[in-house]
Structures are given as C-alpha cells and as structure tokens.
Amino acid sequence: MRLTKKTHACIRLEKDGQTLVIDPGTFSEEDAAIGADVILVTHEHLDHFNEDRLRAAMEANPGAGIWTLRSVAEKISAAFPGRVHTVGHGDTFTAAGFDVQVHGELHAVIHPDIPRITNVGYLVDGSVFHPGDALTVPDHPVETLLLPVQAPWSKISEVIDYVREVKPRRAIDVHDALLTDLARPIYDRQIGELGGTDHGRLTPGATTDL
C-alpha cells in the first residue's frame, strides 16, 4: 500500500487502483476525501468528521461508501441511502479490496467533567492501525501505527507507553496539527528514543510505501 499523509488526523491508503481515506476532518484539506472509494470515520469531533468533505467525496464517486460509528452515520446516512454503514468494536468488513477490523469503543478522557463519546479505530489489511482519539491496543499485531502524537487528551509519556504496548514495526505521526514546528524535535527525539520502534512523520502531501 501507499500511504499519503494529509493534514492532522487524515490519511489516504492506495492499493490496486483503490483508495481508502480515514478521518477527513475540518483541519484537513478540502479535497482530502475526493477520489476515495472507501471512507472511514473514527468519531464525530470536527477535526475527524466534516460533513461537507464527506458529501463532496460521495458525490464525486457514486460508488464510494462510508463506514463509521452510529453517531456519525446518523448525521450523513439520509443523504446517501445504502452507502453509509454503521460499525462497532469487533466488526470486520471488506470494501474496495481493503480488509478492515474495527477496534475500540470510547474516546480518550479529555477531562472528567466532559462526557466521553464513542470512538473506533480501524486496522486495515491486518497491517495499518488508526486509533482515532484513543489509545486502543488491537488484539492483532500492527505493522504501521498511525500515532496520535499530540492532543488535548494526552501527554507524551502516554504516547510513548502506547507505542511500547502496541509494538508496531513503525509509528507514523497523525493528530499533529496543534503541534508547532518548534516542539516537533522534542517529540521526535523522545518518542524515537523511548518508544522502542521506528518513529517518523510525514509532511502533509508526502507519501511512503508500506
């Protein structure tokens, strides 16, 4: 597969002429989901879910479908009957040649006073895992962990321990729009030295073959 990093939490995976996009949110490019055959959304927060971006992608490709949890599906399914699929922890499905496993149930704790919402992660082709806004550890080996490197709900020690627990072959940063260029070398060094795996980041638009 070829992975293309988009801004913040969004990534594109391409394989055999098919494209899968995860979390084309408001912080990502307006065309982040255009050309997708499969769109996965982890949860309803605006930096992961933008209705206009989903509508644009679905209208551009009449064969495209969305797989997401109930809270997002309820917001978009009426516009695209039969093309929006509700999934939850433990589900598996195949779409456009991609095999997907669903892991996790809840968003990470932002603050005890803020109710937790639902959140799912997606393991694609038994290899690439995007956890959304949670530190979910799938019950399956992970080759490439898309690592939520910085968020209001996390601290770097938790991020490092998460990499250690998942034990991926490589970790690539996502959820990084709030991380300034000034701070990036600190995160790169500490996660790289302490995480126990190959750690890297891509600038938006950059690609890597997995």
Image (tube, rainbow, N blue to C red):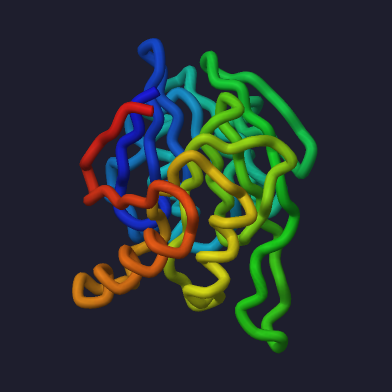
Q: Is residue 70 left or right of residue 207?
A: right
Q: Is residue 92 visible?
A: yes
Camera-side residue of 122 and 33: 122
Asked if 91 appears above or below 62 in the picture, the reply is below
In the displayed structure, 77 sits above or below 118; it is above
Q: Quadrant of the C terminus?
A: top left
Please state which of residues 60 and 169 is positioned toward the viewer in this rendering: 169
Tell me: 114 left or right of 65. right
- Estimate the x, y position of residue 58 in percent, counting from the top left: 44, 31
Q: Estimate the x, y position of residue 150 in percent, counting from the top left.
A: 43, 69
The residue depicted at 31 percent of the width and 46 percent of the height is 6
Q: Position of residue 189 (x, y in %)?
A: 32, 66
Residue 52 visible in the snapshot? no
**Farthest top residue in view:** 16
- State the residue at coordinates (62%, 33%): 84
- The answer to which image quadrant residue 127 occupies is top right
Count of marks overlaid on the render: 0
